[in-house]
Image (cartoon, rainbow, N blue to C red):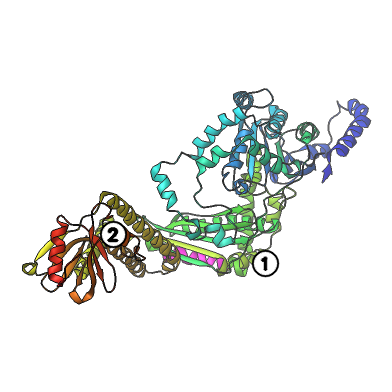
């Protein structure tokens, strides 16, 4: 670690003292020792070696690496804060800030800023992740010093002028596909209850607080972001002490650092703020089994890391590379070609990370491939690989690592993907040397922890055993069968010859609309409740490795939900059928209620107040208001009452009075 001004002063004095001897010997042949010292072979042999960490005067951290002979220079700058820091109601604030740093600044338009790099063959961009934001420019080495100046201009404090902010909003909106909600979207939003939703992946598996709902109104959030919000976010999180700048390429060290100090080093110092996230290990693993219309078995095995250290992340990268090599050799390139590819990857989000294996396996090779995967992981956990074989695999992994990271862009990619958190990586790690020094015992100690069953999430999706047509027919049959069964259960046989009078119960237009909306709301509540049940019961059902059991459980839930929906739909009364010994209140579909004379407490003519102000109004929704014309009130001794009119209400009242044995008044 060096402090830049002191280091540059020492270098300047040394150059001054050596100037005359250097000129005097300039024409002499270099000695073999000098030639060896200047040769780039060491850097090419290990591209991760020789990184220097320098702190500028305001706290900006610079990782410098000279790559002699490489044609391009790659310069990046990053902060360890991303979209996770968006406040609720201001979603996309971190992303919008990233866009605004490329906007009009210091008298130049966004187009001019862009062309300053692309016009001379460079590439530049910014990326916002959940836990960090990263900016870069890659350009020919002759423009390397300019690239440092250009990127510093991007990262420097911006005014966030209102009209510039308004122009910059549309590109963000287009990029993320945000749009204003229509009536249907608002209706769906009203039916969303975040407190009913099960925890998401990061909350469920790592205990990370989501801070906001799963489906925010992004368009509204984006349009609510003000210039003050953008400047406040920048001032809070883009502090020099929280920035990491990487300069990689064939540049003179002192010249590059002088330019970095003159540009990045002039940013005003501020307090470094971080979004503090904590993790919690749930202490359990999960297995999920699914079936779908897929041609091969999709196999995902996720293994969790909690608050990993730098060494643990580097070991995870080694395990990733080692398993990718070994699984590829045994499952893809071996005699039995069970998969096209088996790929481990490492994903980080703040203090949480996971290794995930993704592969697709032919059905007939599943048991074989699963055995190979489990065997390789067990060998890692127990450190039982043959020593010579382990050494050979490690050498091959190192060689591939070394050969694939000879360019400035490839090396800088590590700052984007893995080394962005200054709390974890103060210095740019020498990955090759770390791999070379890892022992099988150290790998086994790490693997025993990360590949423990309590930290694994297994997901297996197999091809559906039936043709899609069969599945569609089965679903239709379930729905139709449920309707027929409910109809048979609810329907009470009627002897049509014994009917003495039929009256259709009239429903006022206003109440028809109100009750229709109530029916829709009731069905919506049922669907929400069923969704909650499915989301809560889903993990338990998915943990059953049986197509028949899962199908039966899901079918049972669908049957219950559909049956309840039919009960709700058939609840509204529609007709009154009068028989000699009873009256029957017939509902919209199937259901009917039989009332004998002794079951009825009252039949009378009533108006609005006596019915609508009755304490049981919610239990017995009336069919009419009874304001202008009275209606017939039938009150059973138990259960629901009825208040309605018919085509000829007076005639019906007279008929009911004769049947009941008492005039209806």
**Residue 195 spot, x, y in % from top left:** 50, 59
**Residue 227 spot, x, y in % from top left:** 63, 34
Q: Nearer the viewer, residue 460 or 159?
A: 159
Q: How many residues crowd mark 1 within 10 Å: few (<14), some (14–19), many (20+)? A: some
Quadrant where the image shows the C terminus: bottom left
Q: Quadrant of residue 111?
A: top right
Question: Mark 1 falls on what kind of element?
Answer: helix
Label 2 or label 1, whichever lies nearer to me, is: 2
The numbered mark, 2 or 1, whose residue comes first in the sequence reads 1
**Residue 503 spot, x, y in % from top left:** 15, 60
Question: Mark 2 falls on what kind of element?
Answer: loop
Chain part drawn in magenta: 366-378
Magenta span dominant secondary structure = helix
Residue that badge 2 annotates = 622
Mark identifier at residue 221: none
Residue that badge 1 annotates = 441
Marks 2/1: CA–CA distance: 78 Å
Q: Quadrant of residue 574?
A: bottom left
624 vs 262, left or right, is left
């Amino acid at each position: 670690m060096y402090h830049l001004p002191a280091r540059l002063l020492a270098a300047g004095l040394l150059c001054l003292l050596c100037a005359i001897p250097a000129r005097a010997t300039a024409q002499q042949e270099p000695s073999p020792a000098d030639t060896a010292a200047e040769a780039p072979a060491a850097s090419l042999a290990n591209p991760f070696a020789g990184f220097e960490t320098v702190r500028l005067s305001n706290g900006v951290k610079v990782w410098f690496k000279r790559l002699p002979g490489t044609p391009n220079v790659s310069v990046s700058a990053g902060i360890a804060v991303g979209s996770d820091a968006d406040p609720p109601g201001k979603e996309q604030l971190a992303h919008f800030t990233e866009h605004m740093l490329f906007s009009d600044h210091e008298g130049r338009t966004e187009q001019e800023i862009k062309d300053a790099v692309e016009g001379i063959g460079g590439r530049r961009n910014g990326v916002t992740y959940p836990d960090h934001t990263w900016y870069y420019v890659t350009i020919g080495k002759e423009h390397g010093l300019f690239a440092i100046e250009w990127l510093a201009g991007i990262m420097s404090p911006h005014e966030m002028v209102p009209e510039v902010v308004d122009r910059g909003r549309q590109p963000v909106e287009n990029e993320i596909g945000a749009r204003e909600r229509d009536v249907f979207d608002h209706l769906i939003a009203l039916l969303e209850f975040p407190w009913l939703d099960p925890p998401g992946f990061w909350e469920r598996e790592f205990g990370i607080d989501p801070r906001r709902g799963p489906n925010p109104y992004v368009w509204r959030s984006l349009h609510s972001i003000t210039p003050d919000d953008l400047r406040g976010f920048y001032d809070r999180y883009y502090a020099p002490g929280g920035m990491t700048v990487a300069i990689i390429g064939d540049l003179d060290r002192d010249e590059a650092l002088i330019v970095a100090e003159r540009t990045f080093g002039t940013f005003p110092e501020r307090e470094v703020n971080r979004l503090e996230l904590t993790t919690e290990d749930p202490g359990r693993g999960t297995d999920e089994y699914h079936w779908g219309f897929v041609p091969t078995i999709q196999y995902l095995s996720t293994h969790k890391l909690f608050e990993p250290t730098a060494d643990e992340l580097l070991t995870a990268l080694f395990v990733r590379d080692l398993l990718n090599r070994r699984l590829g050799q045994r499952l893809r390139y071996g005699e039995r070609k069970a998969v096209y590819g088996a790929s481990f990857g490492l994903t980080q989000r703040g203090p949480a990370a996971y290794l995930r294996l993704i592969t697709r396996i032919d059905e007939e090779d599943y048991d074989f491939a699963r055995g190979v995967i489990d065997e390789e992981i067990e060998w890692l956990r127990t450190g039982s690989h043959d020593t010579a074989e382990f050494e050979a695999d490690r050498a091959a992994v190192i060689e591939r690592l070394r050969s694939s990271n000879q360019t400035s862009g490839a090396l800088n990619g590590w700052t984007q993907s893995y080394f962005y958190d200054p709390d974890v990586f103060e210095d740019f790690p020498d990955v090759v040397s770390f791999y070379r020094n890892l022992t099988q015992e150290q790998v086994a100690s790490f693997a025993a922890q990360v590949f423990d069953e309590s930290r694994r999430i297994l997901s297996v999706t197999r091809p559906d055993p039936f043709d899609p047509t069969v599945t569609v027919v089965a679903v239709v049959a379930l729905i139709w069968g449920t309707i027929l069964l409910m109809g048979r259960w609810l329907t009470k046989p009627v002897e049509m010859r014994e009917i003495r009078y039929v009256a259709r119960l009239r429903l006022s237009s206003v109440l028809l609309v109100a009750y229709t909306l109530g029916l829709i709301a009731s069905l919506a509540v049922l669907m929400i409740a069923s969704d909650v049940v499915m989301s809560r019961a889903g993990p338990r059902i998915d943990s059953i490795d049986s197509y028949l059991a899962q199908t039966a459980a899901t079918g049972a839930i669908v049957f219950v939900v559909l049956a309840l929906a039919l009960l709700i739909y058939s609840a509204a009364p529609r007709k009154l059928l009068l028989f000699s010994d009873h009256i029957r209140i017939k509902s919209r579909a199937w259901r009917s209620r039989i009332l004998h004379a002794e079951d009825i407490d009252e039949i009378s003519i009533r108006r609005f107040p006596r019915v609508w102000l009755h304490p049981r109004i919610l239990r017995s929704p009336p069919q009419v208001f009874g304001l202008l014309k009275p209606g017939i009130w039938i009150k059973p001794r138990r259960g629901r009452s009825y208040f309605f009119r018919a085509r000829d209400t007076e005639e019906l009242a007279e008929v009911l009075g004769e049947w009941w044995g008492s005039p209806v008044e």
